[in-house]
Image (cartoon, grey):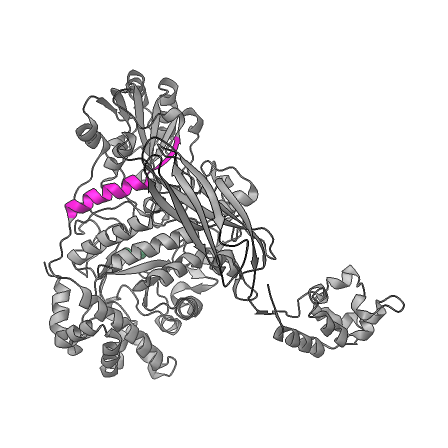
Amino acid sequence: MKATHVMIGTLLAGLSLQACAEQGNFKEEAERLVSQLTLEEKASLTSGRDAWSTQPIERLDIPYIWVADGPHGLRRAPSTDTWGYGDQAPATCFPTASALSATWDRDLLFKTGQALGEEAQALGVNVLLGPGVNIKRSPLGGRNFEYFSEDPVLAGELAAAYVNGVQSKGVGTSLKHYAANNQETERMFMNSHVDDRTLNEIYLTPFEITVRKSQPWTVMACYNRVQGTYGSQSFDLLDRKLKQDWGFEGIVISDWDAVIDRVEGIRAGLHLEMPGKPGHLTNRDVIDAVRSGDLDEARLDQLVTELLTIVLRANASAETDADQKLDGHHAFARKVASQAIVLLKNDAGLLPLSRENYSDIAVIGEFAVSPRYQGNGSSEVKPPRVDNFLDVAGAEYGGGIRLHYAQGYRLDDDRDFSLIAEAKQAAAEADVALVFAGLPQQYESEGIDRTHIDLPPAHNRLISELASVQENLVVVLTNGSAVAMPWVDEVPSIVEAWLGGQAGAGAVADVVFGAVNPSGRLAETFPVRLQDTPAYLNFPGESGESIYGERIFVGYRYFEARQIEPLFPFGHGLSYTSFDYSGMDVSAGQFSDTEGLTVTATIRNSGEVAGKEVVQLYVSDLESRLQRPVKELKGFTKLSLAPGESREVRFTLDARDFSYYDPRQAQWVAESGEFEIGVGASSADIRLKKTVRLESTQELNYAFDEFTFFRVLWEDGQTRPLLIDLMPGWIGSQAGPGQPLEEVEIHGFLLDQPLIKFPFFTAGEVSSEQIAGLIEKANEMTYRP
Ligand code: BGC
């Protein structure tokens, strides 16, 4: 089928669109069109036509584009002006982002993106609204299932692979929700009160990595305020960071109904308000602002040119007669889900189950027949089919075994314990029991944060009761984000299956019966209790203010700094085989920020079966001017090894991997000093370490102000002479008889006074103006961090 709007668009655009597609020169064509547009038309282009499309201008053959949710499948409404909840076109439901990230597999994310791109092409969608790279600040975040990780590097790297995959098929993406959109409570209004350093190091970095490595066609501005300004109106975020610093070439679209002030949005760099407003009332605001001189028309022209560049490009790359490949994608979705499964615990090698050892298997829990496979909200995909474990296991692994199902609990009543007795009997009579437990739909959703991390009471009690009668008990979890496991010590095996998409049940069967060796790793820390988590006291804030008081100590950065033992650490995941780490080498013991560092190590599959290992590299700053996390993930790679096979892994680190964001300097700073490089199998399982020394070549200007302490300038050999020049009398008065001024020991009380106090302390020897002059002079000097 040829997508209708593409047909119209192509007909309208005629030769000119075709010609510019051939030359790839969409920008020139966009400029030409803008020069012919009226002010009213330009204003209309910066708001949607309806729910899911941009404004076409027939007079000039300007086509529209169709955007649709995402991110783990297409939620394409029947038409651009209907909402598509329930009546969306059937599309493959892939595992949600928490599962995708647990694969730690860039290549697989790229291929998942390609599959999504193919489906978008077949459904006539030009831009897929995803992926979401917001950091999982708290396990309570209602949309955590839709986000990748608590770690900015992991989230950014995987998102970039996904975006590159989708866009390789001629379909755009929308990187969302930019930025610091980490909660659902009051999401339309709340202020993410986050300091500059934390914003840059934790919350912006995944966006930056994705933009730099994949140039998403669009970025979606968030609902919330960031440092007091709405994301859709923040010049700092939309222009300074995104365009000027990171070189973003695409357009910014608003989250749905996020826009408060369109004129302010355009000034800040918001290209498109979505969805279009009934009667397009807000277009008037833009027209009036230009007419009154309040908004520079050149700014509007710039944004419309950039927008049309994407519109033209999207239409030119739209395919006709694309195949949605639903069958092939079902099989692929199963593969993806199988790679995402994290084997959290497997005492005495209970898994994989084998026919020789187990012929009667109790399968317990309603999720085994009625799986929860995706999250609630705008990302809901309508899959053409959904597998369930009981059927798949029976059909594909049933030979020689008998499966005995018991419901165990009711998904619509989390406190109904009446089904436990029957389940216990089934478990007691079997050789092994698999219990499917997790979060029912009403427990996690877009728009609502969780208030606790517990499983339903009926699930928790069921698991404990089963453990009392069956020692071969496997818990299979269905959930989009971390949950507490009060029964963790009572059960030998735990399989984290996430929200695994329409084919997730088959993936569980593949892992449980050993057709797939699990290789997923946690992309988020699982805490023992909610009280142990970083944002516990600050999430979700109150009175519209969410204070990011834990600062950069998010996820494992917090658990490690506080020495709190998590339930399962970041990066953790078991395998049916084992891996040896050896032969770590670094390109140099001492290196500069411009040279960077290469790290190599050898990984060997030392077990009996083939398997995949996720090798993780962490950097620790051993001495630093600013407080730093114990260690931070800076590299990872997934490799597949046959039994006995070894392979060398290689990581290349650059200055950024050693830097912190210095809020005073408003830039990244790589400080000279010692760093420890750790290579291991999880954040808590570092197998190899080496200490290296970085010699910084960065030249920074001092950034002093009147509140800088006297001590800072006095203890610096470069700036001490400036003080001596300025206040020789006062410094002399602190000196012993005949002591040169350079060697004076100034009283600690005075050292810890800010410069602003010195007109007072020197009894008028220096004036406020002279202190201002001193600061100016000092700030012209440079230093090496
Ligand atoms: C969500 C976005 C989504 C949009 C369109 C918003 O409420 O935050 O993620 O893409 O709706 O459905």
Residue 504 position in % (x across, y down)? 26, 39
Closest to the observer, 299 or 658? 658
Q: Which residues are magenta?
A: 326-345
Quadrant showing the C terminus: bottom right
Closest to the observer, 754 or 55? 754
Q: Is residue 284 magenta?
A: no
Q: Would residue 461 be found to the left or right of residue 737 on screen?
A: left
Up the image or down, 41 lies above or below 655; here it is: below
- Split into quadrants, the picture shows ligand 1 in the one at bottom left
**Which residue lies at the image location 30% right of the left edge and 57% below the top edge?**
163
Up the image or down, 365 lies above or below 35; here it is: above
Residue 248 position in % (x across, y down)? 36, 67
**Which residue lies at the image location 46% right of the left edge and 57% below the top edge?**
192
Q: Residue furthest right?
A: 737
What secondary structure do most residues of the magenta stretch adopt?
Answer: helix
Whether residue 54 appears in this view of the structure is yes
